[in-house]
Amino acid sequence: MTTTPETLRAPLVVEFPFTRSLGPVQSAFLTGLRERTLLGVRTEAGRILVPPVEYDPETAAELRELVALEPAGTVTTWAWNPDPRPGQPLDTPFAWVLVRPDGADTALLHALDAPGPEAVRTGMRVRIRWAAERHGAITDIACFEPDDGTPRERPPRPHDGAFEDPVTGIVAPARLDYTYTPGRAQSAWLRSLTERRTVGERCPSCAKVYVPPRGACPTCGVATTERVEVGPRGTVTTFCIVNIKAAHTANLGIEVPYVYAHIALDGAGLALHGRIGGIPYDQVRMGLRVEPVWTDGGRYPDHYRPSGEPDADYDTYKELL
């Protein structure tokens, strides 16, 4: 009895630094956090918004009237987080809370340090716990913590937003951790690559061979199960010249300019993409016949190089552009 190979699974991480400059309102807000000062902004209608924004969400008017708020407020809603993830404000279970600071009309999202969900409720009083080291970021608020005090009677105070050495830009790391499951068809394709073969699947209706296979024909809508080995050689259908160095290519020792191309492998019904090497970038052309180059331990072709064959006739690949 044969058994179906197990579908592959792999943990993946997408991570990059997001860099942005700050306008005068956001600059004052983050610099204020560094100085243990919570700032909001007043709208034309007299509402106090926190975090402050530079334009009125109702009228689109420019906002510049900053006010200082008390570092305490009231929980408007919350959700318990029993299993904190890396990079979150606390490494022990905590509550995500929306806190309306005293004197403000909107709420601020942050973490509440509490012993358990039974200790959290809508309407509870909380105060800011400032981080020991502050650099001008939302993390300068380490978290909120329970506060037995009553709402402050002190109204918001005007603030000119002026600080020494203001924060003018931030770098926020963006990260997504997830588990990728390619499914039956692509699991088989990935396994074939470990054998330095490229295997697609043929649609039983239109006979097009999809590489990588998708498990179903996107044109006919029927399942694909017949596996077909294609290539290894193919034809460049179209390409672009890359002139900007990216971190991942620099780490691989790839110098600009280089060529990235769509390659129609022999027998495939659509083109896949790959890097072209072994030829000056300005000599790559449509119709160029290429073959894969594998590196020791590589899980897929490192790049494609000219195979030495005559260029393919345009009519043989024009439907694959």
Image (cartoon, rainbow, N blue to C red):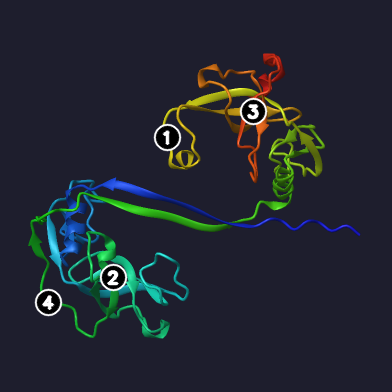
Name the one closer to the observer, 305 or 159: 305
Residue bearing mark 3: 263
Mark 2 residue type: Ala
Q: Which mark is residue 153?
A: 4
Numbered disc 3: secondary structure: strand
Crowd band around label 4 with a 10 angstrom C-alpha radius: few (<14), some (14–19), many (20+): few
State which tag comes first along the sequence, 3 or 1. Answer: 1
**As drawn, is 166 to the left or to the right of 277?**
left
Crowd band around label 2 with a 10 angstrom C-alpha radius: few (<14), some (14–19), many (20+): many
Numbered disc 2: secondary structure: strand
Crowd band around label 3 with a 10 angstrom C-alpha radius: few (<14), some (14–19), many (20+): many
Mark 1 residue type: Lys
Q: Quadrant of residue 30?
A: bottom left
Residue bearing mark 2: 142
Per the model, the C-alpha gap separating discs 3 and 1 is 22 Å
Per the model, the C-alpha gap separating discs 2 and 1 is 37 Å
